[in-house]
Image (spheres, rainbow, N blue to C red):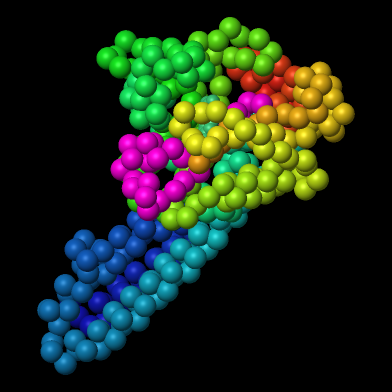
């Protein structure tokens, strides 16, 4: 092998490679040619370079110059071909994957919050502005938390207020109200406490348009030094105005609950007749939306709170009643039926 023939072979390699690379149909073909000409081990250029060792020493740099020229030419051709193939592949994809933006969209079925949950959210949002935080209590409670710790001893006549469903666990029952959550929050937190406890309650009731054996309440509890009845009144009136409108009439009446002293009932002016008296308000012009009062010292003590230092107020409101008023629903049972014809109206 001499300088002239090695040079000629290198030129021939270039002459052969460039048009083949330019004609390669896709990236895979280009990669294959890359390996064929420039592959480190068996590539055509490497094979020719083995001949350099046989040349006289003074010829070697000259042939090195040619090798570099050929390598650069082939590398340049490969780069250009890759660019072209990439652009072609992209153009092909763009052509194949066109989206018809004028095609009508597929309908995505949208759900909605159940009107009861939506009402709970609204109540929580309003009391949230007064600093109340929502907690969750269990639906299965015990005689202790549902009654005794709330100052309702066994055999006390006040138990008649709650027709109770018992479960097959010693002392276990389905909570008849959200008030046991008061005990749980007081035992878990230190004052100042501002807690909201929404949830489902159960009573042994015959079902009709305004009674059901399952229903929803939202309990409120505030405990701090110096909390008094005026705080309770102010917050409930503010709540009624935010919930039912600024002009809503409100009134407090004396009430009785074993866990509050004093106890009150809180009424709003009938939203149906505006106060003149109708079937919805029993011709009184008023609707009772919650019971409330100052937390009984016995209850505070059961919550681990010193009644000499702290006072509290509590309230419990019926959510179903409020949701009925909000949506003009006259039969409570539609909330529980799961009838999509009713529920889909709230989307
Ligand atoms: N738990 C009562 C009920 O279900 C409602 C109630 C009244 C809750 C007065 C209270 C309260 O927190 O202070 O009938």
Image check: 319 left or right of 346?
left
Q: Position of residue 299 (x, y in %)?
A: 39, 36
Name the quarter where the C terminus is drawn. top right
48 relative to 85, above or below: below
Question: What is the quadrant of residue 33 in the picture?
Answer: bottom left
Q: Position of residue 128 (x, y in %)?
A: 56, 50
Task: Residue at 47% x, 19% y: name it.
Answer: 158
Q: Can residue 19 be seen? A: no
* Span highlighted in magenta in the image: 295-323
Q: Can residue 104 be seen? A: yes
Task: Residue at 44% x, 61% y: name it.
Answer: 20
148 relative to 132, above or below: above
Task: Residue at 38% x, 72% y: name it.
Answer: 75
Of residues 164 and 300, the one drawn nearer to the viewer in this rendering: 300
Image check: 144 left or right of 116?
left
Q: Position of residue 287 (x, y in %)?
A: 72, 29
**Total numbered badges shown on the rendered structure:** 0
Name the quarter where the N terminus is drawn. bottom left
Of residues 34 and 149, the one drawn nearer to the viewer in this rendering: 149
Q: Is residue 304 magenta?
A: yes
Image check: 68 left or right of 246?
left
Task: Residue at 25% x, 84% y: name it.
Answer: 63
Q: Position of residue 101 (x, y in %)?
A: 72, 45
Q: Is residue 22 magenta?
A: no
Among all residues in the image, which is located at the extreme bottom? 58
Question: What is the quadrant of residue 97 in the picture?
Answer: top right
Image check: 30 left or right of 207?
left
Among all residues in the image, which is located at the extreme top? 206
């Amino acid at each position: 092998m001499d300088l002239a023939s090695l040079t000629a072979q290198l030129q021939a390699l270039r002459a052969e490679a460039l048009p083949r690379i330019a004609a390669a149909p896709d990236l895979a073909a280009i990669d294959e040619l890359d390996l064929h000409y420039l592959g480190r081990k068996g590539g055509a250029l490497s094979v020719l370079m083995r001949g350099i060792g046989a040349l006289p020493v003074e010829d070697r740099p000259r042939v090195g110059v040619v090798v570099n020229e050929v390598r650069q030419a082939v590398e340049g051709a490969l780069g250009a071909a890759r660019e072209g193939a990439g652009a072609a592949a992209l153009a092909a994809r763009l052509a194949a994957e066109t989206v018809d933006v004028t095609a009508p969209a597929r309908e995505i079925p949208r759900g909605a919050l159940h009107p009861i949950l939506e009402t709970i959210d609204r109540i929580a949002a309003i009391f949230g502005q007064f600093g109340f935080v929502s907690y969750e209590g269990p639906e299965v409670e015990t005689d202790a938390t549902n009654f005794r710790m709330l100052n309702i001893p066994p055999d006390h006549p006040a138990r008649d207020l709650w027709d109770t469903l018992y479960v097959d666990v010693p002392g276990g029952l389905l909570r008849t109200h959200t008030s046991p959550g008061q005990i749980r929050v007081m035992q878990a937190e230190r004052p100042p406490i501002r807690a909201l406890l929404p949830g489902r309650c159960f009573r042994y009731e015959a079902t009709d348009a305004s009674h059901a054996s399952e229903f929803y309440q939202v309990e409120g509890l505030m405990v701090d030094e110096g909390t008094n009845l005026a705080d309770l009144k102010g917050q409930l009136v503010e709540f009624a105005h935010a919930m039912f409108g600024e002009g809503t009439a409100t009134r407090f009446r004396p009430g009785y609950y074993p866990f509050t002293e004093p106890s009150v009932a809180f009424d709003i002016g009938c939203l149906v007749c505006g106060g003149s008296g109708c079937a919805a308000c029993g011709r009184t012009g008023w609707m009772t939306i919650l019971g409330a009062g100052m937390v009984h010292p016995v209850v505070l003590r059961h919550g681990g709170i010193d009644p000499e230092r702290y006072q509290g107020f509590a309230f419990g409101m019926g959510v179903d009643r409020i949701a009925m008023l909000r949506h003009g629903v006259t039969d409570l049972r539609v909330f529980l039926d799961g009838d999509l014809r009713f529920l889909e109206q709230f989307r």
